Image (cartoon, rainbow, N blue to C red):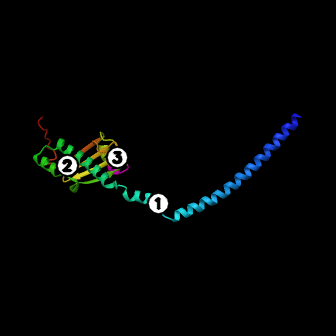
């Protein structure tokens, strides 16, 4: 009797399982065809989602000018700071006022460059970083490095090294405190 009940339950479960799986299989086939037909019809016509997509990309702010402005601000600030601290002549003080984005040249430099490795070897206090630049204005050239991307944040330079040609290469003048 026990065995008969078990067999009956097993056969019923098996038949229900087969019936259920066949129904699921039929439903799975039909909705895909219906859904794909609806999607094809929707993609072909104008919809709110397409309008939103187009409007979003038309109104997205162009971030390149802002990034460039932040980078130039950070580089000019570091250059001016170095000139003030290293060149105490009256001419230098006048030149600082003239420095702006139109009259500087700058370039990002990389640690793989043989020239960067060369001057880093001569100036051991400088360390290679991911964001390093060389800025040039008139007779001044400045190596500047940052901890994070200077295009993204207004920040102080991590390291900077100014070089310039003075009146006499061997003349060293220490400013009075």
Q: Is residue 145 magenta?
A: no
- Residue 68: x %, y % from top left: 30, 53
Given the current orientation, which residue lies at the most extreme bottom position?
44
User: On the rendered structure, is 1 left or right of 44?
Assistant: right
Instruction: Assign the magenta stretch its main secondary structure.
Output: helix
Q: Quadrant of the C terminus?
A: top left
Taking the spot 30% from the left edge, 49% from the top edge, the residue there is 133
- Displayed quadrant of residue 13: top right
Region rendered in magenta: 112-117
Q: Nearer the viewer, residue 147 or 50?
A: 50
Q: Identify residue for label 1.
A: 50
Taking the spot 37% from the left edge, 57% from the top edge, the residue there is 59
Numbered mark located on residue 18 in the image: none
User: On the rendered structure, is 9 left or right of 146?
Assistant: right
- Residue 83: x %, y % from top left: 19, 45
Numbered mark located on residue 149 in the image: 3
Callout 3: helix, strand or loop? loop
User: On the rendered structure, is 158 left or right of 29?
Assistant: left
The answer to whether the residues at label 1 and label 3 have Cβ atoms under 8 Å apart is no
Q: Is residue 115 magenta?
A: yes
């Amino acid at each position: 009797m026990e065995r008969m009940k078990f067999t009956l339950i097993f056969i019923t479960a098996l038949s229900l399982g087969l019936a259920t799986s066949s129904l699921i299989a039929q439903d799975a086939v039909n909705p895909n065809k219906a859904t794909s037909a609806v999607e094809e019809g929707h993609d072909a016509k104008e919809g709110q989602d397409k309008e939103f997509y187009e409007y979003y990309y038309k109104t997205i702010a162009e971030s390149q000018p802002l990034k460039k402005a932040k980078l130039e601000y950070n580089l000019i600030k570091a250059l001016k700071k170095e000139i003030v601290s290293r060149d105490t002549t009256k001419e230098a003080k006048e030149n600082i006022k003239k420095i702006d984005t139109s009259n500087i040249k700058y370039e990002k430099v990389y640690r793989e460059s043989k020239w960067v490795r060369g001057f880093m070897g001569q100036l051991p206090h400088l360390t290679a970083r991911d964001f390093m630049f060389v800025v040039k204005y008139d007779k001044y050239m400045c190596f500047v490095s940052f901890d994070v991307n200077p295009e993204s944040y207004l920040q102080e330079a991590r390291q900077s090294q100014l070089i310039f040609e003075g009146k006499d290469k061997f003349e060293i003048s220490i400013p009075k405190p």
